[in-house]
Image (cartoon, grey):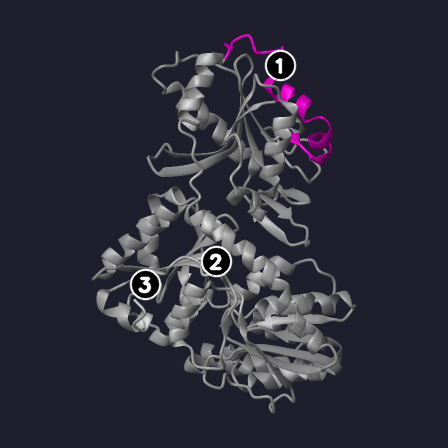
């Protein structure tokens, strides 16, 4: 059996659903390789590019042999992996048929290989020499490309599900050129193995501190999640339902499940909301499901009116166009062409809709169609939320259990909540972290430091983090700080899978991440909305960066 580092995976890795593919590869490598091989799992590194900017990465697995050299392996899970040469984008489809953008696994493996060779050559006790170094990609649950994907992506560097299960050993042998070591390469040697152990496993620690806490919280939330679907059974025979609930009560989760169920029944189904970033996020998750359309409300108005041939009004200001004219065009479109109506319409975050927009939504529902409206019950922020049960003849129901936020986050968020009682069912979780700084500049620096700490010290994946601001000016100032870092960032609209989201609270509304760093700068947003919306975006870890005199009202005296 191969010599593995670590010799046993910690529970925090075994229970992390995002690492299932890596766990399978870890176990399989231990089975097929003998004890001449050393296998190093999850080796992070931090370096610089040619311009001196920081770059970081991780080698999922580094396989080392004293005669054959080293093999850097990148692992990608998912039942289907695809590559689109037109945009150079790799994608993974999970077991629920959700498609996610992923990083280029070949580039990751190749980068890890070069970095490991560089690091090895820098070890003073190892005699620098040219060794054989290879890279490869394993898809434990997906097939490999039928042919090469380019000169730097030949088919033989991929190991798919079939070969992984039947003959992984041969693939490793081929990648390491066992018995056919290039003439210009020398053996890695036992001194090379010793150098790698000093680099990667002496002492070997998997430091999953906050990262482990997030994984454990996510596992508990996954157990609780199916209980949210009970309400769908309750409304199955109700044509029109209004479901209220505070943040974290699962409104979006239930809305998505209702959309999937409706579409699977063959019903022409629409899932819509006001926020463009939320609409884009839902579309990425649900794209490709037959009978289901996901559109933001204004995109719905524009597309439907265009299909019906409804002309745009002339000489109308931008605000009037979006708030009044576009909804009117939607109403005219479905009146002109009833075939454009929907069998089921599901509205998420309904509190964001203006009262007169519901006239257009109501007109879009086909005869004997279904309407489901999900909205936030927080009267502190939203008041009446622009809709009552009488407006659309809907039957009101209520979600009363918080299944998104840990109890500690829920406790701080409820300071800014006025509405029906909500019970937090999640784990206690980590204490809310308060970082006090007196001016905007030092707040930005503190938030940047916290982001780096989470990624590099606490083993939190960038995809699990969002840094939020209560105004665009502060966001832009922070982005200036990140220009030289290796941590990839995105915004709420793109929400790239492997990147930290940096955006405003308002644009991140309706979305969530396991860890949130909130920077309060006193600009542009009513304080109650800032606190309530921002606090409830965090599932398991919340860090608030604010001035000392802001802690009292933000925490409600809890701190």
- The single residue placed furthest to the left in the displayed view is 438
Q: Work out whether 239 lies above or below 195.
A: below
Q: Mark 1–mark 3 contact, CB under 8 Å? A: no
The boundaries of the magenta stretch are 158-187
Local secondary structure at mark 2: strand
Residue 518 position, x and y percent, is 36, 61
Q: Nearer the viewer, residue 287 or 252?
A: 252
For mark 3, does the 10 Å Cα neighbourhood hold few (<14), some (14 to 19), or many (20 or more) residues? few
The residue sitting at 36% across, 14% down in the picture is 125
For mark 1, does the 10 Å Cα neighbourhood hold few (<14), some (14 to 19), or many (20 or more) residues? some
For mark 2, does the 10 Å Cα neighbourhood hold few (<14), some (14 to 19), or many (20 or more) residues? many
Residue designated by label 2 = 513
- Give the quadrant of the N terminus: top right
Instruction: Look at discs 2 and 3 and give the one toward the viewer.
Output: 2
User: Which disc number belongs to residue 178?
Assistant: 1
| Magenta segment includes 469 | no
The residues bearing labels 1 and 2 have C-alpha atoms spaced at a distance of 45 Å
- The single residue placed furthest to the top in the displayed view is 183
The residues bearing labels 2 and 3 have C-alpha atoms spaced at a distance of 22 Å
Would residue 462 be visible to someone looking at this image?
no
């Amino acid at each position: 059996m191969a010599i593995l580092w670590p010799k046993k995976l910690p529970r925090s890795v075994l229970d992390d659903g995002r690492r299932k593919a890596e766990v399978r590869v870890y176990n399989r490598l231990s089975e097929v390789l003998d004890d001449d091989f050393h296998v190093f799992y999850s080796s992070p590194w931090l370096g610089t590019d040619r311009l001196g900017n920081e770059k970081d990465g991780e080698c999922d697995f580094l396989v080392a042999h004293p005669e054959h050299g080293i093999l850097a392996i990148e692992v990608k899970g998912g039942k289907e992996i695809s590559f689109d040469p037109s945009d150079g984008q790799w994608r993974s489809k999970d077991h629920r048929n959700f498609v996610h953008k992923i990083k280029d696994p070949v580039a990751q493996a190749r980068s890890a290989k070069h970095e490991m060779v560089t690091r090895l050559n820098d070890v003073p006790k190892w005699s620098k020499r040219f060794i054989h170094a290879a890279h490869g990609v394993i898809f434990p649950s997906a097939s490999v490309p039928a042919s090469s994907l380019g000169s730097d992506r030949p088919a033989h560097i991929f190991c798919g599900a079939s070969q992984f299960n039947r003959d992984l050993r041969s693939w490793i042998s081929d990648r390491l050129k066992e018995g056919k070591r290039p003439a210009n390469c020398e053996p890695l040697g036992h001194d090379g193995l010793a150098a790698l152990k000093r680099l990667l496993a002496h002492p070997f620690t998997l430091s999953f501190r906050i990262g482990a806490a997030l994984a454990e919280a996510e596992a508990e939330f996954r157990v609780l999640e199916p209980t949210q679907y009970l309400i769908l059974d309750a409304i199955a025979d109700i044509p029109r339902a209004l479901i209220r609930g505070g943040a974290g009560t699962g409104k979006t989760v239930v809305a998505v499940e209702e959309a999937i169920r409706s579409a699977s029944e063959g019903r022409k189904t629409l899932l819509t909301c006001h926020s463009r970033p939320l609409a884009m996020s839902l579309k990425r998750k649900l794209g490709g499901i037959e009978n289901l359309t996901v559109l933001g409300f204004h995109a719905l108005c524009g597309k439907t009116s265009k299909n019906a041939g409804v002309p745009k009004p002339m000489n109308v200001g931008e605000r009037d166009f979006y708030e009044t004219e576009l909804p009117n065009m939607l109403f005219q479109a479905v009146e002109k062409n009833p075939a454009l109506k929907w069998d089921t319409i599901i509205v998420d975050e309904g509190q964001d809709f203006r009262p007169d927009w519901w006239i257009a939504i109501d007109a879009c529902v086909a005869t004997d169609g279904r309407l489901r409206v999900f909205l936030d019950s927080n009267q502190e922020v939203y008041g009446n939320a622009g809709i009552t049960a009488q407006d659309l003849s809907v039957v009101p129901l209520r979600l009363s259990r918080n299944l998104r936020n840990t109890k500690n986050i829920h406790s701080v968020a409820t300071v800014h909540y006025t509405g029906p009682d909500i019970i937090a069912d999640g784990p206690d979780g980590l204490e809310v972290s308060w970082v006090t700084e007196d001016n905007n500049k030092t707040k930005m620096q503190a938030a940047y430091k916290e982001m780096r700490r989470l990624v590099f010290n606490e083993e939190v994946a960038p995809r699990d983090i969002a840094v939020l601001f209560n105004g665009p000016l502060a966001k832009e100032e922070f982005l200036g700080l990140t220009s030289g870092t290796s941590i990839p960032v995105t915004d709420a609209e793109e929400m790239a899978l492997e990147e930290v989201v940096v955006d405003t609270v308002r644009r991140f509304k309706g979305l969530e991440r396991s860890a949130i760093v909130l920077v309060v700068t006193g600009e542009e947003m009513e304080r109650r909305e800032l606190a309530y919306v921002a606090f409830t975006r965090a599932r398991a870890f919340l860090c608030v960066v604010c001035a000392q005199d802001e802690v009292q009202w933000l925490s409600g005296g809890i701190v």
